[in-house]
Amino acid sequence: MSQDAYNYLFIGLSFALYIGIAIRQRAASTQEYYTAGGGVSPFANGMATAADWMSAATFISMAGSLAIGGYDGSRFLMGWTGGFVLLTVLMVPFLRKFGKATVPDFIGDRYYSKAARLVAVICAIFICLTYIMGQMRGVGLVFSQLFGIEIATGVIVGGAIVFFYAGLGGMKGITYTQVAQYCVMAFAYTIPAIFIAIALTNNFIPQLGFIGDYTAGEQAVPFLEKLNKINTDLGFTKYTDGSMAKIDMFCVTAALMCGTAGLPHVIVRFFTVKNVKAVRTSACWTLAFIAVIYLTAPTIGAFSRVNLISNLNEKKYEETPQWFRDFEKTGQMAWVDKNADGKIQYWGAGKSESGKSGKVFEGKPRFHNDERGASGERLLSNQIVTDSPNELYFGNDVMVMANPHMAGLPKWAIALLMAGCIAAALSTAAGLLLVLSTSISHDLMKKIIKPDLSDQEEIKYARLASLGALLVAVWFGINPPSTFVAKTVAFAFGLAASSFFPTLLMGIFSRRMNKEGAIAGMIAGIGFTLSYIIYFQFMGGTPDQYLYDISPEGIGFLGMLINFAVSGLVASFTPAPPPEVTELVDSVRYPGGEETAAQGH
Amino acid sequence: MNERLKTAKGRYWKAQLRCVGTLLMLWFLVSFGAGILLRDWLDVNFPSVGSAPFGFWMAQQGSIIVFVILLIVYAGWMARIEARLDEEGGSR
């Protein structure tokens, strides 16, 4: 069977499974549409949350950024798992006890005002949209890889599929589909890692191979030492050292962590289980399932770097493996023969006379149709960076997909990986789409604009809103703010960290926090973060203008501090919240009675 | 709400804060502490994990393992605190 046949088979089968589940579990009431009726078991919810949580960014991009950045990539590893700890101990048990369906619901009631609810809805929309852009981009990448089409077409195809089953199934359908998607993802991620670990380190547990010996060479040497040597030989910094400023590393990690704890689509997941105790058990399961993939990611990153370099560096174009030309065709890899020696050189800053970093050319690759250079490579119309000797361009996103090709894995493993990538992007996009549509239909339409909305109409609005949101997401998926999926997603976290995280935290842990403080804080936090991101991503700000060396990815942390400070300040000279709100705060702090609270909505 | 229940609930909240505080301290230590702030120092001065320098290993593997353990401890610890609240008059 050919590779294409395998791809179609695996992806077709997995789609049949998801759609079958979505149809069987179709939501009948708003309660089922928003929170699956509140009766999902902690184990199943854990798996579904893990799938929801692990997006295309995790699945496709993270190992790539580890491969390129080495130690620097740890910010994603720690940020996205550590944030889960924050989420579990500081947020979800209390919000679950409160028992309403959405995050703006809590903010609206806790801060007793429609204005606060409205600000929360707007924040939710911004966060989810930014996040979903990253997902659509991921879906597009996979489809373009699969069918050899342009990424833009891939994004549109992906969007249609997401709409079909997220709009249809609601939370109930999504939850059970996500359980299936987690299983696909876990296999798709770990199986290639195991094969490669055996090939490179003779150890079938990738995590042990990673810290063990490299055995594919003439004599066994410690794997990480080998990788460090490869890096320094080619003029890069040591793999285990990285090159990010410590303060930036700290801020990005903190923004990712606090952002996780403020992400509406993850918080909502925990409204689907029975009670607060089940929330805690469910969170344990979720993080354990997530850890399976996160502990594997650094091994994939490191292994694929070794493979990439041994496959391509100092090779003539005509000697390169077929997959290199395939990725070149979809524009995810490119080669510029700067020194005209006909060989590919992948070199870092250390090899350049100017000491500049190893950029090949400016911006993302733009090809001259299909014109070929002297060695047969595709020619680019980009501005070539001449003071850096690096000749090989590849997107971070391509590493995971190229990985099984580089290692020469069997065809079915490659097909499985493709199915996994799609599962990752679809599951997250579906979860986000649901929160987006809920924010609009429930929080905006029913609670603010049209309180007499019937159940049926509300679902109708929700489905309509998800269509609208998806169209926007598809557009941004085609014209992304950053070509790199994980980075786009990191912005969403910055926005969540600077808006929801502080406001929810103070709503639970401070009796004194009032509506004036909360609203001012949210606006100041998200306003600051958003303007910083827009300035540097869209208006041509350069890295030497960074505030305290903090990149736009990490600015959410500063935005969060601003939110805290502004809230505290404003609250201190405005009136205390009314007694019924203090009672509400007390009630979410103590256990009991949550089974009935869930029906109250 | 009677007095006894009130003090029981006050104790419950304090116990919960203690639990959360302890876990978050450990959370900070393994991630921001070992993984970022002290990473270079730990790389040099601590025994390697296999061939991985200690700080680097904490950042890429160790912290994640600790996080999972923290959540398991949290679930167990909170269950005990809640059981005590139930004994002391409870809320349900």
Image (spheres, coloured by chain):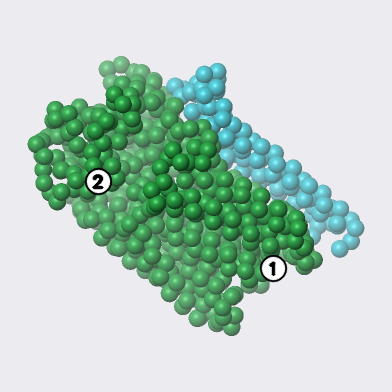
Distance, label 1 to label 2, CA atoms, is 51 Å
- Give me the chain that's cyan: B
Say which quarter of the image contains residue A112: bottom right
Q: Are marks 1 and 2 on the same chain?
A: yes
Q: Position of residue B17 (x, y in %)?
A: 74, 46
Q: Crowdedness of circle 2 by 10 Å Cα count: few (<14), some, many (20+)?
A: many
- Give me the chain that's green: A
Element at badge 1? loop
Q: Residue at x 47, y 46 (%)?
A: A552
Q: Position of residue A254 (x, y in %)?
A: 55, 42
Q: Measured along the vertical axis of the image, is residue A547 above or below residue A165?
A: above
Label 1 marks which chain's residue?
Answer: A
Q: Give the quadrant of the C terminus of chain A.
A: bottom right
Q: Residue at x 28, y 28 (%)?
A: A347
The answer to whether any part of residue A117 appears in the image is yes
Element at badge 2? loop
Q: Measured along the vertical axis of the image, is residue B44 above or below residue B27?
A: above
Front residue of this view, candidates A359 and A510: A359
- Three-letter amino acid code at disc 2? Pro
Q: Position of residue A509 (x, y in %)?
A: 71, 53
Sequence-wise first label, 1 or 2: 1
Q: Looking at the image, how many numbered discs can be counted on the residues?
A: 2
Q: Residue at x 38, y 48 (%)?
A: A540
Say which quarter of the image contains residue A579: bottom right
The answer to whether any part of residue A252 appears in the image is no
What number is the disc on residue A112?
1
Front residue of this view, candidates A350 and A141: A350
Image side of residue A582 versus residue A496, left or right = right
Front residue of this view, candidates A283 and A394: A394
Q: Which residue is mark 2?
A: A365
